[in-house]
Image: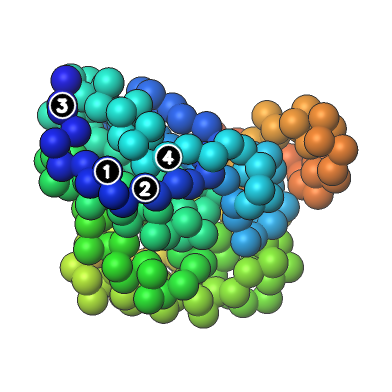
Amino acid sequence: MTNIVNYDSENKFTGRISSFQSMGTVDGPGIRNVVFLQGCPLRCIYCHNPETWGKNGGREITEEELLNKIFRYEKYIKKNGGVTVSGGEPLMQAQFVTSLFKKLKSNDYHTAIDTSGIGNLKEAEELMLYCDLIICDLKFTNNADFKRYCAGNLDTVLEFLHLSEKMRKKLWIRQVIVPGVNDSEEQVKKLKEIACRHSNLEKIELLPFRKLCVDKYKEMGIEFKAENIEECGNDRLRLLQSIVNVK
Ligand code: SF4
């Protein structure tokens, strides 16, 4: 197990996490620890993790505790996998993630963030210095839908993507396909067109809208605005994915 020789005990960052997944296989290459941070500025109607929205929820964790948790899985994740910080929105705690990634990089871990691209660009730039892969969920390809379905702004995400290219960071772009909302061939071609403007793009992944989160919303006493929308079928997803494949 790695001894935290590179940990600067004077630098006591704390963050808020929602959960920790020890063996994730879908959020970046290989087997990964996935840290779900607390707090998100968006309100996507199809969100699976509404418990991560509030910035004061989850639990506080010190950087040292989180690093020790990660180092416990070293033999499973270090060789071909790594650590992905997801959310919520990792850019809401960018300084915490930057500090965490600094330590992970000095211990030879592969690092990734899974982000909506909405956040402070200056802080994002600092974070990217220590990040190997950016997974950006480009939720909608026009401002009207972005605002209507996620309460966010596409232009901010485009600036973030541009920054990732400038910083020469590997980029994966994702989108959740919601029937009747963004599941037309025209929509995914637009997604591909925007994604392919970036020379650092490695792949585009489409994810199906699912409703496994209905009970969570009920327990939390909040409305699931996508309750009456059908789930995305596998055949439809395969067809749309074949359109956006870049290699
Ligand atoms: S960005 Fe992610 S966590 Fe935030 S509301 Fe959208 S789906 Fe949920």
Q: Is mark 3 within 8 Å of ligand 1?
A: no
Residue 234 appears in the rendering = yes
Residue drawn at x 19%, y 33% is: 4
Against 122, is 78 above or below? above
Q: Amino acid at mark 4?
A: Thr
Residue indicated by mark 2: 12
Q: Nearer the viewer, mark 4 or mark 1?
A: 1
Q: Is mark 4 within 8 Å of ligand 1?
A: no
Secondary structure, mark 4, is strand
| Callouts 1 and 2 close, C-beta under 8 Å | yes
Left/right of residue 91 with respect to residue 165 in the rendered view: right
Residue drawn at x 28%, y 63% is: 128
Depth check: give the residue in front, 233 or 72: 72
Dot 3: within a 10 Å radius of its alpha carbon, few (fewer than 14), some, or many (20 or more) residues? some
Q: Amino acid at mark 3?
A: Thr
Q: Which mark is residue 2?
A: 3
Alpha carbon of mark 4 to alpha carbon of mark 1: how far? 11 Å
Against 228, is 23 above or below? above
Residue indicated by mark 4: 62
Task: Please identify the quarter of the rendering in which residue 50 is found.
Answer: top right
